[in-house]
């Protein structure tokens, strides 16, 4: 988003003292203003220059505020317009809002009221600009299952994943539940020469040892009670492609030994069979546990770890990449909307940005599916969000500690900035200090 000083405002009012007062008031809070008492001149200026906001008097000649609203939006549909109205013209001002004006300001107005209205209009303009951009990008891009992010650490991870994708090297993906480890595995497979071959996944924590061995390597008829026919395992099904072993840290020592053999020799036997089978499979493993700790405890084999750990990728938690939240929010809005995607209010977006998201992207996805359903095609408001999400944003600033206020401010700056260097400049600190604060607040 732009910085406040970059906001350009067109002000049109045929009462010169009001025109000048608005200009002085808005420039005192950092806005750049162009003032004119003549509607025709305002339209000429709007054709030559770009504006973010416009304050338009309702009663003017030869074009009144309603016609100016229509003509300005014909020039720039993205312009955010505030109508200035006298007391007797409230109905017309409300009609203008229905026709696309952001809000109206009633004369005589307090200067503080003007500044607050302008700041809210600017925030609305910034948010709608982001919504429009993200919606276009999401709609234009097919759902490839690839990772949605603009976080620098995740972009670096995906860059590395793309560079090793076309090799046969094993990959270990670490990260909390819901951070998108499976999407990263899909990303690697889809960018490899194996793309046309199967991508087979298995959750190693979801099955007991006996069933997991059969799922991985297959079995023959009569191998155990209930084995009524021969069955291929996941490794055979994935031949030529990729197998994704989710929660690999949960497998037993005996299956770890068999998995190590497959990685080393590309050979295995079905359960109950002595025939050795060959397989050509790329192995990608994932875990939400600390494998270094599992190695120290002796619950995970060193040799298997080093075989899986040829390339180690660490998925960043969503609370550590707040700049991705608006991007993901609008992706999920488009994904879950049955018809035209609903809008989202500034207050609802603030609540989503401030939430800690310990369930990561998966939790955000569930919240947005619920919100889209409850909004019923209208604007998503805080009332459509779960209580635990709303509660964070409803805490009054004066009730927060100084550290919490600092953390909230850093989160907002990180969302707006293009990178960490720009964020440090906005905050007035050096990048090393920002790094320490991000580490302190787990941002």
Image (cartoon, rainbow, N blue to C red):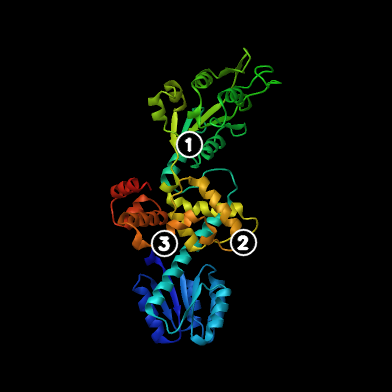
Q: Nearer the viewer, residue 301 or 224?
A: 224
Q: Which of the marked residues, 2 or 1, is nearer the chain's N terminus?
A: 1
Q: Which residue is mark 2?
A: 377
Compared with 305, 173 (above or below) is below
Residue 186, x across and y down, in percent: 55, 37
Q: Which residue is mark 3?
A: 2
Residue 45, x across and y down, in percent: 47, 75
Instruction: Look at the image and tell me in which quarter the N terminus lies.
Output: bottom left
Name the residue at 63% across, 27% down: 237
Give the number of marks: 3
Contact check, label 2 and label 3, Cβ < 8 Å:
no
Residue 195, x across and y down, in percent: 59, 34
Give residue 234's quadrant in the image.
top right
Residue 3, x across and y down, in percent: 39, 62
Q: Nearer the viewer, mark 2 or mark 3?
A: 2
Q: Is residue 60 visible?
A: no
């Amino acid at each position: 988003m732009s910085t406040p000083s970059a906001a350009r405002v067109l002000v049109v009012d045929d009462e010169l003292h009001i025109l000048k007062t608005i200009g002085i008031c808005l420039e005192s809070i950092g806005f750049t203003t162009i003032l004119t008492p003549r509607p025709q001149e305002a339209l000429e200026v709007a054709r030559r220059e770009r504006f973010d906001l416009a304050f338009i008097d309702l009663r003017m000649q030869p074009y009144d505020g309603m016609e100016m609203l229509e003509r300005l939006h014909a020039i720039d549909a993205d312009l955010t317009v505030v109508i200035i109205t006298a007391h007797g013209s409230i109905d017309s001002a409300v009609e203008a809002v229905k026709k696309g004006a952001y809000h109206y300001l009633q004369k005589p107005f307090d200067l503080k009221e003007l500044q607050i209205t302008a700041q809210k209009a600017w925030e609305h303009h910034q948010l709608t600009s982001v919504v429009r951009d993200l919606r276009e990008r999401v709609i234009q891009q097919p759902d490839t299952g690839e990772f949605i992010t603009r976080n620098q650490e995740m972009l670096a991870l995906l860059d590395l994943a793309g560079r090793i994708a076309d090799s046969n090297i094993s990959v270990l993906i670490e990260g909390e539940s819901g951070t998108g480890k499976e999407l990263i595995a899909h990303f690697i497979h889809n960018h490899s020469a194996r793309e046309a071959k199967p991508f087979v996944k298995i959750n190693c924590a979801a099955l007991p040892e006996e069933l997991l061995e059969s799922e991985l390597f297959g079995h023959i008829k009569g191998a155990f009670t209930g084995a009524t026919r021969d069955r291929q395992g996941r490794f055979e099904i994935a031949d030529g492609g990729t197998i994704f072993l989710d929660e690999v840290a949960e497998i037993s020592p005996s299956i770890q030994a068999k998995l190590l053999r497959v990685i080393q020799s590309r050979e295995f036997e079905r359960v109950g069979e002595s025939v050795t089978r060959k397989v050509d499979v790329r192995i990608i493993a994932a875990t939400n546990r600390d494998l270094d700790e599992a190695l120290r405890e002796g619950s995970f084999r060193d040799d298997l770890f080093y075989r899986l750990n040829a390339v180690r990728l660490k998925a960043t938690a969503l609370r550590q990449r707040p700049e991705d939240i608006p991007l993901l929010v609008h992706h999920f809005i488009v994904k879950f909307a049955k018809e035209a995607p609903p809008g989202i209010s500034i207050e609802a977006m603030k609540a989503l940005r401030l939430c800690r998201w310990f369930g990561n992207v998966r939790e955000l996805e569930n919240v947005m599916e619920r919100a889209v359903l409850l909004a019923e095609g209208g604007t998503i408001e805080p009332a459509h969000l779960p209580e635990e999400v709303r509660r964070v944003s409803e805490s009054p600033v004066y009730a927060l500690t100084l550290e919490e206020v600092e953390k909230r401010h850093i989160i907002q700056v990180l969302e707006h900035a293009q990178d960490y260097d720009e964020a440090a400049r906005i905050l007035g600190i050096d990048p090393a200090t920002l790094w320490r604060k991000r580490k302190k607040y787990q941002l």
